[in-house]
Image (cartoon, rainbow, N blue to C red):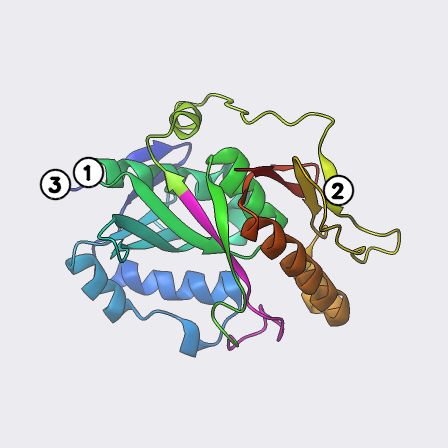
Amino acid sequence: MPSLEPVQHGAYTLRDLNTPAERRECERITRRCWGVDDLEIIPASALTALQHGGNFLAGAVDANNHIVGYALGFLSRKGNGFAYLHSHQLAVMPEHRSYGLGRALKWYQRDWCLMRGIDHVEWTFDPAQAPNANLNLEHLGAHVRHYEPDFYGELAGALAGSVATDRLVAEWPLEDERVVTKARGGQHDQPAVGHEVRPALAARQDGLPGEPELNLNGAVRVALPESFTNLIRDDLEAARAWREAIRATLTHYLARGYIIRRYLAGGYVLFPH
């Protein structure tokens, strides 16, 4: 399979990472972006083996040929034989995050997949992290149907802060109308969100989560904290309270067949299937 041609994104180039030195840079970016212990970092030798096996590894390279971000994905197969790409990691150095590189790496990943006949990508993300929710749902057009409590167990490092590592599973159908429109730079904002959305979880005036409302029908909204990362660092008990409230609310509605399709005004919007 031929390599995807490099793509220019402003002053950056998006391309496959092909040398041991480039893959070693991914270790440095992981350590800087996530603050995890070395035990949790995928070594360059493993990245080499994954890429050699036909998996996805691409980076964002600045004008000085420095790698400032990368994305990693590996080919996967569900029990029914359905083949897809599991996008495992996406990281951009903090000083380069205002240039849309995370979004650009995902679109590069989409092109890589379509070149290989892969039309579906999945990945996990922290349900309490608003920036990730906004990227995945609003900019990429993904949706969510599954919640995984404490997915990784305890992570070694400061980022998790001893809070359970809950994850949502983002599903990205690459040729869905909403995704195609966004890939072309359009603003496909369906499903539309009207005034009928009711709050299933809201923030209290003190910044803590209120009591989940679990008996609502129709579209519902689930609020997120303004910065879950800051809570982990500054107020661990508040972070745990948000984790538990978000888990209770989302698992309840997802079990009822709801789908998370939008992220607006600081919260998820879930629609009945």
How would you rate the neighbour count of disc 3 (Cα within 10 Å): few for under 14, some for 14-19, many for 20 or more?
few
Q: Earlier in the sequence, mark 2 or mark 1?
A: 1
Q: Is residue 241 magenta?
A: no
Question: Which structural element holds mark 2?
Answer: strand
- Find out whether the residues at labels 2 and 1 contact each other: C-beta distance under 8 Å: no
- The magenta-colored residue range is 155-171
Where is residue 73, by image quadrant? bottom left
Q: Amino acid at mark 3?
A: Pro
Nearest to the eye among marks 3 and 2: give it: 2
How would you rate the neighbour count of disc 2 (Cα within 10 Å): few for under 14, some for 14-19, many for 20 or more?
some
On the image, the x and y values in percent for residue 207 come to 82, 55
* Residue under pointer 1: 117
Q: Residue at x 69, y 25 (%)?
A: 194
Is 82 above or below relative to 193?
below
Question: Which structural element holds mark 1?
Answer: loop
* Residue under pointer 2: 199
On the image, the x and y values in percent for residue 111 come to 28, 35
Q: Amino acid at mark 1?
A: Gly
